[in-house]
Amino acid sequence: MAGVDYGKILKRLQKGDSDQLVEEIHGSLLNGYVDQDEFATVGDLGPKLLTNQAGNQIWNQLRHELQTCRSYIFAVAFVTDAMISCLKPVFKQLADHGVQGRLLTSDYLYFNQPKAFNELLKIPGLTVKIAKVDGFHQKGYIFQHDGYQTIIIGSANLTENALMRNYEWSLQVNSLNNGDITRQVSENIEDEWRNAQPLTDQWIAQ
């Protein structure tokens, strides 16, 4: 990385964004991706590996992001009724504060049960669609905050085992709204969302 003027990059980034947020992202990226010894992290926006081990529970991080976000999108192949029960109080609280969310899931391998689909329809503030692509196997959680996105992508579906007990690998990253990874993820999920089937009572019956 010799010859890169990080101070100049930082000044460029600060145009149009809050100085504190840009500095947190800047310091966290250099610490997480360049040199943890040379660059001190600023705030808590650095990349994190979530594993469910040693107090590093994915569910705790998801809940924290939900409780602090402005909106959220989940793209997960598998959903269980037990995990929906854990999320219902959080989703209701978010809906009471005007925070809306979307969930893109599937009937891949017929893992998701009609009971789980029925429970999803009852959640206020949550719009659910069924992906119309073969082999839909995504596990991604996207949270929009003020000026930046938090993205958690890995091996964890929306199930109790995956979010609380299994040994999983999920990587959490943060990006300013104009960051390229934000663009890539947003374009992909919006394209899939446009082509997806809305979850309805009629679809479940069929």
Image: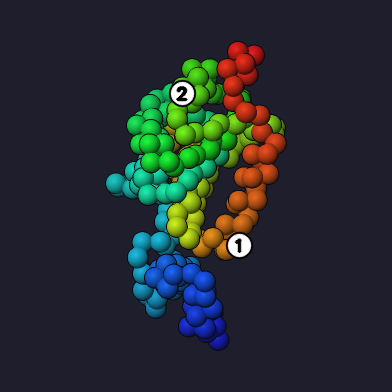
Q: Position of residue 5 (x, y in %)?
A: 52, 84
Task: Name the side, left or right, on which 88 lies relative to 151.
Answer: left
Q: Are marks 1 and 2 in contact (CB under 8 Å)?
A: no
Kind of residue sitting beneath label 1: Asp
Mark 2: few, some, or many residues within 10 Å (few <14, many ≥20)? few
Q: Which quadrant of the figure has residue 89?
A: top left
Quickly name the residue at label 1.
Answer: 180
Q: Which quadrant of the figure has residue 36?
A: bottom left
Q: Is residue 154 visible?
A: no
- The disc placed on residue 122 is 2
Q: CA distance from mark 1 to mark 2?
A: 35 Å
- Seen as rendered, the residue at the extreme bottom is 3
Mark 1: few, some, or many residues within 10 Å (few <14, many ≥20)? few
17 versus 158 height, above or below? below
Disc 2, SS:
loop
Quadrant of image for the C terminus: top right
Q: Nearer the viewer, residue 160 or 204?
A: 204
Mark toward the start of the polypeptide (1 vs 2): 2
Task: Name the side, left or right, on which 3 lies relative to 94.
Answer: right
Q: Position of residue 116 (x, y in %)?
A: 48, 22
Kind of residue sitting beneath label 2: Lys
Q: Which residue sits at x=48%, y=83%?
A: 7
Quadrant of image for the N terminus: bottom right
Q: Nearer the viewer, residue 192 or 57?
A: 192
Q: Position of residue 27 (x, y in %)?
A: 42, 72
Q: Nearer the viewer, mark 1 or mark 2?
A: 2
173 versus 90 height, above or below? below
118 versus 92 height, above or below? above
27 versus 142 height, above or below? below
Q: Which residue sits at x=49%, y=55%?
A: 149
